Amino acid sequence: MQQLQETVKKILDQIRPTLQRDGGDVEFVGIDADLVLKVRLTGACQGCPMSRITLKEGIEKFVKSELPTIRAVEAVE
């Protein structure tokens, strides 16, 4: 599981500059037993009306393309 977490963190590092350009960021929280990645959206992404689209169409789509074993990406508070 440690290897998987490190791989996911590297993938999130690739997404991070795009989010930071708009004043936001993404933080790794964990991966549950069902291989659902938990992240926290911060900065401008936190509470943004478009954050759901950013999460599903941006972050989740990219993570799953790089690492198909991840089943979904969910945001936590």
Image (cartoon, rainbow, N blue to C red):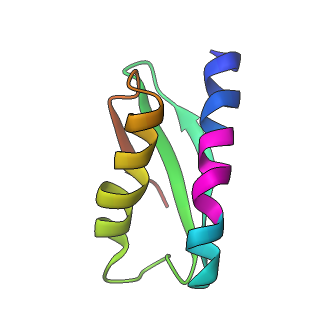
Q: Is residue 54 left or right of residue 25?
A: left
Q: Is 59 drawn above or below residue 2 in the view shown? A: below
Q: Position of residue 2 (x, y in %)?
A: 70, 18
> Which residue sits at x=56%, y=84%?
22
Secondary structure, magenta segment, majority class:
helix
Which segment did they paint magenta? 10-16
Q: Quadrant of the N terminus?
A: top right
In this view, the residue in front, 7 or 2, is 7
- Number of marks present in the image shown: 0
> Which residue sits at x=68%, y=40%?
10
Q: Position of residue 18 (x, y in %)?
A: 57, 70
Q: Position of residue 61 (x, y in %)?
A: 34, 47
Q: Is 45 drawn above or below residue 12 in the view shown? A: below
Q: Is 17 drawn above or below residue 31 in the view shown? A: below
- Figure quadrant of residue 55: bottom left
Q: Is 2 drawn above or below residue 71 in the view shown? A: above
Residue 15 is one of the magenta-drawn residues:
yes
- Figure quadrant of residue 57: bottom left
In this view, the residue in front, 44 or 8, is 8
Residue 34 is one of the magenta-drawn residues:
no
Q: Is residue 47 left or right of residue 13?
A: left
> Which residue sits at x=47%, y=34%?
66
> Which residue sits at x=52%, y=50%?
39
